[in-house]
Image: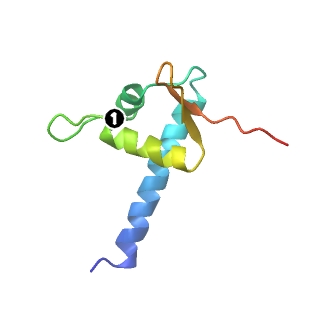
Amino acid sequence: MINGNEYRKSQIAMAELKAAVLSLLEKTPGGMSNASIGRSLGIYTGHKRHEGHISRTLLAMLETEGVVDQNPEDQKWSVRVHQSS
């Protein structure tokens, strides 16, 4: 059974990875592809020709959280612009 310490460590690691993705996107006004994000952060490697899954999973999580969007035309990711009411 996993104790709370390992769970806490994994959640901190996920938060740090998501923060790194956001920081990179905030510095790139035109957005970035999944491959560019993964390679820039050194997380593009994968298992048996499945490169990009780590960065893509992080992007999917951030998209679900409403923080990033993907442009359907060029497939680039950027920080979501929130409209104030």
For label 1, count other residues whose C-alpha is less than 10 Å away and answer few (under 14), some (14-19) or many (20+): few
Is disc 1 placed on a helix, strand or loop? loop
Residue 28: x and y in percent read 56, 24
At 81% from the left edge and 41% from the top edge, which residue is drawn? 84
Q: Is 21 drawn above or below residue 78 in the view shown?
A: below
Q: Is 74 drawn above or below residue 56 in the view shown?
A: above
Q: Nearer the viewer, residue 46 or 66?
A: 66
At 35% from the left edge and 29% from the top edge, which residue is drawn? 39
Q: Which quadrant of the figure contains the N terminus? A: bottom left
Residue 80: x and y in percent read 63, 36
Residue 54: x and y in percent read 34, 43
How many numbered discs sit on the rendered protein? 1
At 39% from the left edge and 35% from the top edge, which residue is drawn? 41
Residue projecting furthest to the front? 72
Residue at image mark 1: 42
Q: Amino acid at mark 1?
A: Gly
At 60% from the left edge and 35% from the top edge, which residue is drawn? 79
